[in-house]
Amino acid sequence: LKSVVLGGAWAFVAVAMAEQRAADDLYRKTLRFLVSVAAELAYPKLQLRGGHTLGDGFLYELEGGADSDEEVEGIRKKLMELVEAEETIYRITKPWKKAMTYFQEHNLTAASNLLASRVKTEVPCYECHGVLRLNLFELHQNASALKAGTFTLVRCTEMPGFVASYTENYQLQSALLISHTDHKNFCKGYQVRSVGELNQLSQVGRGRKDFVLACEFRQETKIAEIVAKVKERSAAGKAVKVICIAGPTSSGKTTFATKLCMYLQNNGYAAKPLTVDHYYLPLPRQPKYQARQQRSDVDYDHIESMDVELICEHLNALIAGKSVMTPVYNMKTGYRDGDGHKFDALPPNGILVIEGIHALNPMYTQAVDVNKVFKIFISPLTALQLDDHNCVKTTDHRLLRRMSRDYLFRGNSAARTLSMWDNVRKGEGVWIFPHQNGADFVMNSAAEYEIPVLKTFIEPLLRGVPADDETYAKAQDVLSLLECFGTWPPELTPGQALLREFIGDGVFDCH
């Protein structure tokens, strides 16, 4: 009876959490829409672009403006006027020609390019105070909905732009800001800043092929930059001995770590990957197990489930030139098997490469000289605009990768992946994102051609989700996103591409 009651309580909590996430998402989409409306009303001759997620907010730039506090304040005041006046957000349709004319006349290039590549007789739109935008998502029906939460506009001091945040005390994520800006400049250089421009790349000739190669060359360049930073540390007498890699699920950590080891070896380092997934505490030492002796109580995402003391001991021993016996953790029993595996000592030119959910947590490497540790945060931070104030979400990009991998290599249906998605992500906000700004390098693993390739595998799966399935609504949301993209053949993807980790037939395949 007790287990039944507990199970019911957890089910209730899960439903409540899902409802809250949906409410938060609706609020944030409405915030982005109204910021865009406010910017057009306040500065009709300037153009607001952006919507990239940056911590607890969205990054924008007012193109053609002075990038001043006064401009940001002008947008904020107009936004507050819309909210206080309780302006209605109308759902309407416009003939394709009229919608296209409006977007072109207002220099909304991302929206007009998307319409040009996805022609419909009638275009779903939203209208507020005479301002027209594409209907890409569900929004609140009235601007007054923003009164239910907190929002603020914060001007960036390090680079042009401002952040529309949905928290009171927004903390600027400098490392992510630099990575976002760098990636946006890459896309600008190739004139592929939006989904519409990506769709317009020619499938005949070199258009798509060259862009795929450019995306791959860019990622290789970033890995070379990391190695260059490691060499700079060595030249300064602060040799790096441990490289820690962490990122949310489906960021491409495995392929990235493999490539990084190869690049390090090409530069004279003996790079050795160390798997920390086996450093879990045995059941009797698990804090949450000790209370009720129930294995289900153990949270394997929590750092308290890790044998941090042993990790630190082994790292220091290996750095000091000693061999260790690394544990072998048996997930079926919750205990360690045998005496473990021998891990040979690092040579003088050796570097340990470790990756895991806690790799950026200072507790992981607290016993190691900070000068010997190099931390990398990895995530696909796409720069592609859907329209001029909405971007492809990093979370959606990762979900598409995960869905493809789950189906191709684990036999999971789209509904199965969607049902597990929130649980898979639950530890990221607690154990990864709080430490991302402390990384020495942000590795943006996004290649902007990926979604058209992933669409080939995923679209049929999503169309097969039954209407009475609990994940049907989410499946339809993902399908709506995919409908904005063309379909590209998987054969365009090079064998060494990180995307191959999720679609197979790669040179690093271990599936």
Image (cartoon, rainbow, N blue to C red):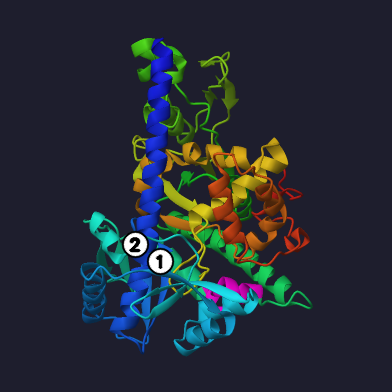
Is residue 486 depicted above or below 94 in this figure? above
Q: Amino acid at mark 1?
A: Ile
Q: Is residue 436 left or right of residue 444?
A: left
* Number of residue marks: 2
Q: Amino acid at mark 2?
A: Ser
Q: What residue span does the magenta drawing correspond to?
A: 186-199
Q: Mark 1 and mark 2 in contact (Cβ < 8 Å)?
A: yes
> Magenta stretch: residue 89 in it?
no
| Snapshot quadrant of residue 176 | bottom left
Q: Residue at x 71, y 47 (%)?
A: 508
Q: Nearer the viewer, residue 157 or 264?
A: 157
Q: Nearer the viewer, residue 47 or 344?
A: 47
Q: Where residue 413 sits: x, y (%)?
A: 66, 39
Residue 178 image label: 1
In this rendering, does residue 98 appear at all? yes
Quick one: SS at disc 1?
Answer: helix
Crowding around mark 2 (Cα neighbors within 10 Å: few <14, some 14 to 19, many 20+) is some
